[in-house]
Amino acid sequence: MSPPASLAALPAPLYARLFGYGTRRGVASMILGMAAFIINDTLIKLASASVPTGQLITMRNIMAATLIVMLVVMTGQAAHLRRAADRVVVARSLIDVIATLCYLLALFHMPIGNVTAINMATPLAMTAAAAVFMGVPVGWRRWSAIVAGFLGVLLIVQPEAEGFNAYSLLAIAAVVFIVARDLTTRRIDTGIPSLVITLTNAVFVLLGALALSAWEGWVAVNLVQVLLLAGAGLFLIGGYLLIVDAFRHGDLATVGPFRYTGLIWALLSGFLVWGDIPNLLAFAGIVIVVASGLYVLHRERVKAREEAAANPGN
C-alpha cells in the first residue's frame, strides 16, 4: 500500500520503515499516541492544583499551536493552511473542543485511574459505532475479546464508589464525543496534512478555553507550572498527530481496541508520579487487556487472509 499523499512531519522515513503504512502502522500510532496523551494528562494534572481549568488549557494550547505553526513552516506545508477551513476538519475540531473540555474537567476533579477507566470504554463505543454507522463487520470473537478487555480494565482500576463523582458524567460524555471525533477523522480528505488538522484542532480548543477562562478568571503562574504546560503542549501535539495517523492507516475495529494501552501508560504514570503500585488483580487485568488487544489484531489478520483466499483475483 502506498502512503497517503500528505502525511507530512509524522511519517518520517524512519517511522515509515519501522511500521509501514497499513494496519500495523495504525496500531503502532495508536499505542504511541495513547502514551503521549497520558503524559500530557499527567503534566497538566500536576499543574492544575493551583491554576483554573480555562487558563491551563489556554496556556497549553497557545504553546501547542505555536509549536505546530513552526512545524508547518519547517516542513513547507504553509500552502496547505487554507485546507484548515475544510468543513470536515472544522467539524472534527468543534467536536474535539467539547470532548477536551469534558475530559479535562473530569481529570482535574477525579483520580486519574478512574477517568482513564471510563475513557477505556471508547474502544467498545467505537466498535459499536463502526458497525452501526459504517457497516464495519465485527464478529462474535472480536466482540468477546473487546468485552474481555473491558473486564480487564475493571480489574486494573478496581474502581470504588467514592472514586466516581458527578464529574464521571463528564468523562462519559467525553467518550461519546471522542468516538464522534474519530469517526469524523476517517472522512477527512487524505490530501489534507495531519499537521493542518492538528493545528485547526488546537486553535479551536484554544478558543473554547479562552471562553471558559473569561468566566473563571486568571491567576499568576510560576516557572514550574509554565514548564509543565509547555511539556503538556508538546506531548499533546504528538498525541494528536499519532491518533490522526492511526485512523488513517488502520481499520476502526482493529485500531480502536488499542486505546486500552492508555490504561497501562496511566498505571505507569501513577507509579512514577504518585507512587501507586498495582496489586495482583491489576496485573491480571493488564494481561487480559493486552491479550485481548492482540487477539483482536490476530482475528483481523485471519479475516483478511480468508477474504484474500476467497477472492484471489482481487
Image: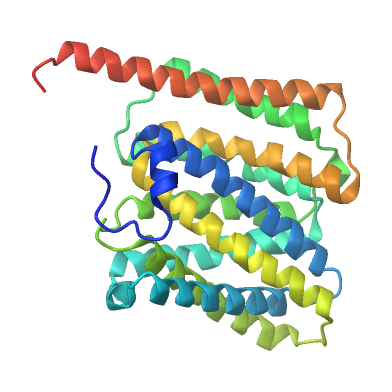
Model colouring? rainbow
Residue plotted at (56% across, 45% down):
32
Residue plotted at (53% across, 22% down):
294
Q: In the rendered view, does 114 fall on the left or right side of 93?
A: right
160 w.r.t. 38: above or below:
above
123 w.r.t. 138: above or below:
below
Total number of numbered labels? Answer: 0
Instruction: Point out residue 103 in the picture as x, y percentages from the top left corner.
Output: 65, 58
Q: In the rendered view, does 262 fall on the left or right side of 162?
A: left
169 w.r.t. 157: above or below:
below
Q: Nearer the viewer, residue 45 or 164?
A: 45
Residue 310 shows up from this direction: yes
Q: Quadrant of the C terminus?
A: top left
314 w.r.t. 60: above or below:
above
Residue 188 falls in which quadrant of the image?
bottom left
Residue 124 shows up from this direction: no
Q: Residue furthest left?
A: 313
Q: In the rendered view, does 262 fall on the left or right side of 112?
A: left
Instruction: Point out residue 145 in the picture as x, y percentages from the top left corner.
Output: 54, 20
Q: In the rendered view, does 97 fall on the left or right side of 312?
A: right
Instruction: Point out residue 221 in the picture as x, y percentages from the top left corner.
Output: 82, 83
